[in-house]
Image (cartoon, rainbow, N blue to C red):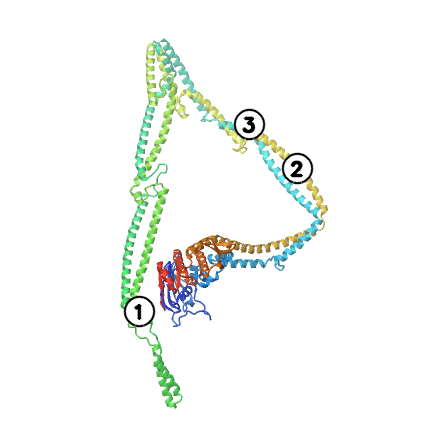
Amino acid sequence: MKLIAIELVGFGKWQQKKIAFLPKNQLLFGTNEVGKSTIYQFIQAMLFGFPAKGKRKKDYQPKSGGAYGGRLWFSHPVYGEVQIERFKAQNKGQAKVYFNDQIGDEATLEKILHPLTKELFQAVFTFQQEQLNQLDKLNEEELQTSLLSLGLSGSQQLLLSREAYFKSAQTVYKGKGSQPPLNQKLTEYQNLQKRINEKEQKERPFQQLVTELADTEQEINQKRQAVQDIKTTLALVEKQVMNLPLYNELHTIEQSNSSIIISQEEQERLLSVYQQYRFLSEELLRLNQTIAAQSETEDQTEDYQFYLAEEVHIQQLLNQRYEIDKLLAEVEWMTQSFQQNQQEMLPLEKQWGWQVATVPQLPFGEQEVEKMHDAIVERTIKLQTVQTDLRLLEEEIATREENLSTFETINKEMFQKNKRQQKKSLNPLLCGIAAIIFMISFLLPTPIRYGGLIVSLVSLIIGVLPLFYQSKDPYENEKRQWQEKLSQLDYLNDQLIKIKAEIKKLNEEEQETAHFIAQKVKENHLGKMDKVEFWLNYRADITRYLILIKTNQELEYQLQEDQKRVTAISEQTKRFTTKLPIAGMSLAERMRVISEFADKMEKVRFAQEYQADAYTRQSIRELKDKQQQVIEQGRTLMHHFQISSINEIPDKLRSYQTASSNHKRKNELQHMLAGLYDDNSETEQLPAKQQELAKTLKELEEAIHQLQKKEQKLLYQRQQMLSDGTLDELYQEQAIVKTEIEELALSWSADQLAGQLLIDLLTELSEKQLPNLLKKATNYFQLLTAQSYRAIQLHEGQLIVVRKDQQRFMLHELSTGTRDQVIMAVRFAFLYLQEHNSLCPIIVDDGWLHYDSQRKKQLAQLFAVFSQQQQVICFSSDQEMVSYYKELKQPIIELEGA
């Protein structure tokens, strides 16, 4: 909080006096009796209320009988600029508070000033010579107490609360007391315990028997529960061991690679196709071998024999040549397209900072983006318009204020007369004459008496007539003009506030929009496309980039699939590498070599068939046609079961039959073993676990049997030892007293603990601040003594100072001026620790009684330094202090007599 200004309408000798304060350091200079202390009392009265009247208390009510009170302005970090108005004759001296276009009362003022109180204001923020003398000899305990009462807001209340808790605790229990209820109950409990001990000595064996019996019953129950758990676990393990072969079989089936499951009818159809093809192939091979043996191309018999053996595979491969060429062309085209798309994506990624890993997305539709853009443009135009209106309005207000000032200057006489206010008073001369005639009339004869009474009455009426007569105001027209100008100026100021509020609102909306856009850019990975204009004008870039990414993803997936097909076809050609030079070639080159080899061998075939007889040639053609028919008949079925060659049918059938039987067996085993085993079952250890559980179960059952025998024996002994119930009655009485003690102890401990916690809290707070206090006090003390002393320390609980030559002094060993400097440094260190609160400005009233010239100069330097953090208001009649303020270029406010 910082004081801005005060207006003393009527307070002590001050009348209609306004003083403006600076936010940092200032010296209010005036001669003795000029009214400096009155200003301090006025500040205190405005903040905390008028001082109560007393015989030995100074009365600040104006002697002239005018208004008693005034106004005070201060700035608050939360409530802004606050105005306090307080007059003794209005609202019983209660304050009116104006802040943020609101009006509050005394309770509002207390809330605004909290935690500042009148006591805190007087004890902490006011510096007077009397206070410095009160802190003369400080030790560590007193220093920490001062920290609590001065440095920590609300600590005094904590100390009072602590004492209240301790007093409340003593009403319940005292260490050496006998009357408090807890003391009485403890005595009663001790006597009762003594009686119980005497009785237990007589019945100790019985107590031991009861304890042993309870332990035995508890042990039996525990072992019975353990037996039940083991039986449940053992039953499960036995079942697992019994089904172990089935589990191993299921595990083996699950680990095997199951193939496609086909029906028996489909298996028979596949087998029929294979048998027909095999028979025709053997006949065709026999005829070709016969022709080859009889032909003249014996030098190519070995290659031709290889061709005949692999003719089916070669022809199947060559029949796919169109699909293979198409596949290779498609791979080449997709590879080129993929590369072209990547080249097209590079400029977009460079321009907008996009990445394929974090795909950019448009957060809004085109219409929404247009609406956002229109809203931004509209807000920008509106902001420019409002700013223009603000400038024009400020110029208009300045012009009207200048006109108003000119008007007030011209009509200065009117305002002066208005301030003096016409006094309405009766005519004392006529009233005195009326009184004299009235008294004389009673001494006159009767006819004259009535005349005298009439004359006195007329004189009295004329004498009091000024009290009821209102003269016409000669400045009525000027006053009306002045009021109109003020009203117009108030209206313009209201409009100014509204325009500023609207500008603030538009700026906040603009900031919110910018934050929203930045958030959407981050969420949708838009990179450098961080403006709504970009979203609107370059929307096609995002669409194109997304299309390219999706196209490349599809191309990449299709390329992988086609490469798999190319690899599979290449694998089919490996069987020809023993006779054909195709190793290391691409698929296209391999197909070319295989095609040329097939053409060559077909020429050999033609030559052989040409040399053969007509019947043999006809038989070969018929066999080939039948072979082709068989292939066509089985093609659909083979394709369905992913069989590429007829020669693979036997192996496929064997795997299909095995898979079918395994699948059926797997379903049976899963149904039989459901719920028996889990994923973590260790099947190898199950037999050993079964034996161990059976052994443990047998041992537990034997132990339970022995414990039951022991329990029966103890029950019999207890029945024999039971006597009277005196001890039970004592136990019951003890339990009742113990419950009462616990309730009282709980109440006592709650108060005691609360008080102790408050002590610990206050000690912790003061101990944490004490080193900082001494460090800052040392800095201020060095400044005040021109570095003649180097430290303020605590030694054996006492405050000491260390001079520059390492010599140490207790406080009582110092001169009065130096001791005052120590206390001043400590006080300012207190205030430094509270700088973050800034509760109140520092007010100093001639607090340098024992200071020489050098000390005063150093004190002025301290005020200048400290005022960088907190407002300092210094009252003084010392001309020497004024010279130091001028030397330090600190502001001085001269007070003139009221």
Does residue 852 lie above or below 660 as drawn? below
Quadrant showing the C terminus: bottom left
- Could you say where residue 670 lies in the image, as x and y percent from the top left? 52, 31
Amino acid type assigned to the residue bearing label 1 in the image: Phe
> CA separation, marks 1 and 2?
114 Å
Structural crowding at the residue carrying mark 2, measured as other residues with C-alpha within 10 Å and reported as few (<14), some (14–19) or many (≥20):
some
Residue linked to disc 2: 703
Going 36% across and 44% down the picture, which residue do you hit? 520
- Could you tell which of marks 3 and 1 lies nearer the N-terminus? 3
User: In the depicted view, which residue is nearer to us: 714 or 599?
Assistant: 714
Considering every residue shown, the one lying at the far front of the view is: 805
Q: Nearer the viewer, mark 3 or mark 2?
A: 2
Spatial distance from mark 3 to mark 2, Cα to Cα? 36 Å
Residue 725 visible in the picture: no
**Residue occupied by mark 3:** 245
The secondary element bearing badge 1 is classed as helix
